[in-house]
Image: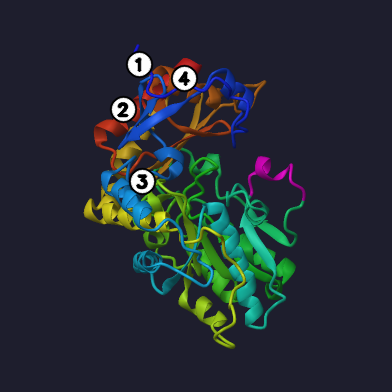
Amino acid sequence: MTAALAPIPNDFESFWMPFTPNRAFKRRPRLFARAKDMHYTTADGRTVIDGAAGLWCTNAGHNRDPIVAAIKRQAEELDYVPAFQFAHPKSFELASRIAALAPCDLNRVFFCNSGSEAVDTALKIALAYHNVRGEGTRTRLIGRERGYHGVGFGGIAVGGIVANRKMFGPALGGVDHLPATYNREQQAFTKGEPDWGAHLADELERIVALHDASTIAAVIVEPMAGSTGVLPPPKGYLQRLRAICDRHGLLLIFDEVITGFGRLGSAFAAERYGVTPDMIVFAKGITSGSVPMGGVIARDGIYQAFMRGPEHVIELFHGYTYSAHPLACAAGLATLDVYRDEDLFARAKKLEPFFAATAMTLKDLPNVLDIRTVGLAAGIDLASRPDAAGLRAYEVMERGFHEQNVMMRIAGDSLALSPPLIASEAQISEIFDKVGRAIRAAG
């Protein structure tokens, strides 16, 4: 047995773990002590390949030397600056770099600290935008069934994952939802964007007719719904949404917390699909998970709508203590350098066919109902146990960690695979081979 790399805590009780069955975890913990590139090292010294880029975020891999060095330098130079009424140079540099990656006139960046904060920020900007333009009746927000937009009250209101909503009351009022884009009968075992489903965007016309466009502020969707089990958009779906929003004066928000920074083979999914939203929500990959950061990229016209009135008056009463934190900005700049210098977005695009073909080798395993792939992301649906929905996927995850030395994500009885963009073909094959073994073992 390899010597332990870090002390194993003797009391698991104090930490109330998020999105985790606490009692089951604490009976049989899954603890990591180190990470580098494509791998974690457990507290007892085992090497585990990362099939999920942490939580969809370590796109450049773990503990990359240039990112670590940038964080260290920044911590030694400047630890904190308030973003209210003051700033530091790297916040402007990073905003400019992000704006240069975004399509068209998406060139105004508002920083926060997570995807959840970024979603709520985008929703508030949308409401305020209509207000400052004299259309304050536009207060309704439209999300989508099976959508995930973080855990703020705004995010769970427009989100469409039942378990994330049911315990917390009505959240925001005046919210409606588009139907989910997934239909297993029509789309099973699709590589890339399914042919069936573009017409589902037309449900937005029905919602507009029900509520009237004068009451609707914005529509928010994930270009690819990730947390619900990897649902790529049907061909033409996002284009139809854009056209309907334009027709009725609705803002279109893309939640690219997962799809941003290379996951689908381009800087943003908006580029892959040739659709320019009014705002892009980002987080996760901006720092490759090294320091918390998120933000919103808004079109220039949205920003300019607020730039009226006396210059000494705050235009948007919104922000966070740690917006544009110096360490996060340093990490973000170094991460963008790694993406550029190693051409990781193009690398992901080149790997996509191999990744998809390898994922589909699991098609005939017992209890596999569907596999979906797009970019470097795959969702695998498993048949639920008759007496316990979600238990089969949980057992696959456990066996993957303890027996196969692979990490994966689960959502209900779906598995999600999304390795760092630095993964080699051999490592992609290793991930799916180990996941396949775990599926067989779970039965």
Q: Say which label, 4 or 2, has the lower sequence index.
A: 4
Image quadrant in which the N terminus is located: top left
Which quarter of the figure has residue 127? bottom right
Label annotation for residue 399: 4
Q: Within 10 angstroms of label 2, few (less than 14), some, or many (20 or more) residues?
A: some
Q: Which amino acid does label 4 sit on?
A: Arg
Q: What residue type is labelled 1?
A: Ala
Residue 115 picture location, percent across and down: 52, 53
Q: Is residue 387 above or below residue 243?
A: above
What residue is at 46 percent from the left and 26 percent from the top? 31
Q: What element carries label 2?
A: helix
Q: Say which label, 4 or 3, has the lower sequence index.
A: 3
Magenta region, residue range = 160-169
Q: What element carries label 1?
A: loop
Residue 439 picture location, percent across and down: 46, 22
In front here: 5 or 354? 5
Q: Say which label, 3 or 2, has the lower sequence index.
A: 3
Q: Is mark 4 on a helix, strand or loop?
A: helix
What residue is at 65 percent from the left and 21 percent from the top? 386
Closer mark to the observer between disc 4 and disc 3: 3
Q: Within 10 angstroms of label 3, few (less than 14), some, or many (20 or more) residues?
A: many
Mark 1 and mark 3 residues within 8 Å of each other at the beta carbon: no
In the picture of the structure, the residue carrying the numbered disc 2 is: 430
Q: Which amino acid does label 2 sit on?
A: Glu
Rounded to the nearest angstrom, the CA distance separating label 3 from label 2 is 18 Å
Residue at the far top: name it: 1
In the picture of the structure, the residue carrying the numbered disc 1 is: 3
Q: Is residue 219 above or below residue 285?
A: below
Q: Within 10 angstroms of label 1, few (less than 14), some, or many (20 or more) residues?
A: few
Question: Is residue 281 in sight in this rendering?
Answer: no
